[in-house]
Amino acid sequence: MNRLLSEMLSCADPAQVAGLSRFFKTAPGQYGYGDRFLGIKVPVTRDVVKNCWKETGFDELEECIQSEYHELRLAALLTLVQIFTHARKDAELQKRCVDFYLEHTDRINNWDLVDLSCYEILGRWLLDRDRSLLYDLARNGKTIWEQRMGIVSTMQMIRHGELDDTYAIAEIFLEKPQPLHDLLQKAVGWLLRDAGKRDMDRLRIWIDSNVARMPRTMLRYAIEKFPEDERQAILSNG
């Protein structure tokens, strides 16, 4: 019995489906087109995962990650995060979690699925390892979601005071053909902003050197925490 699946299904709320479908842009031509929802909000999913992760194996995760329903894929990812996090002294199990994650990137197909999982799994795994995987995802990812993983995973490095990868991967996105997808602009700007919380002077220098190449949305996100007069001056000259 797949307890994770059954408990998630029991939480379905049809009254929430329309709102979630609009929020995650599932109309024709939008980035989430075709996705389906059960009407389960993230806090509810987190509660289910908290209760079920210890008895959820990779077969159960496979069943959930392959679901047509967004919330079941999210539940699988959040469960994978829990398994990975609690396997601190089991490198083999952690590697299996990473492999599972990378084997299912086609099922990680919306911004929340990326943002709530990649830095906890890929970012944490790569803290003391070669990080070329993140550069490859950012540069060559087959979808905007794989590319987003490349930059968002550096959140883990930022939290450990390591900023070089965030700036280097941001450069990759500046080199991409424009216009850059809005969701990639937002992700890069967000991570630059968070890098700035660690070292605002470094962010200022980087912005000054690259402002002419930065897409507008990326720039606005990156300088969100600057003093208002400085922010307006940058936007006026950018």
Image (cartoon, rainbow, N blue to C red):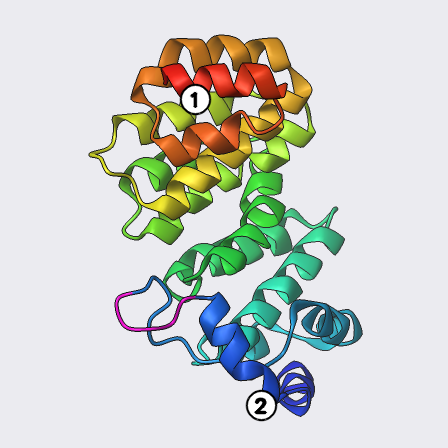
Q: Is residue 88 above or below residue 216?
A: below
Query: Viewer-proximal residue, 235 or 86?
Result: 235
Quadrant of the rendered image containing residue 197: top right
Determine whether label 1 and label 2 are within 8 Å by CB.
no
Looking at marks 1 and 2 on the same chain, the residue that comes earlier in the sequence is marked by 2
- Residue 53, position as x, y percentages in the image: 72, 71
Left or right, 149 with respect to 227, comes to: left
What segment carries the magenta color? 25-29
Specify whether residue 34 is painted magenta: no
- Residue 171, position as x, y percentages in the image: 36, 23
Disc 1: which residue: 235
Disc 2: which residue: 14
- Residue 17, position as x, y percentages in the image: 53, 82
At 46% from the left edge and 13% from the top edge, which residue is drawn?
206
Element at badge 2?
Answer: helix
At 57% from the left edge and 21% from the top edge, which residue is drawn?
163
Amino acid type for the residue under numbered disc 2 = Pro
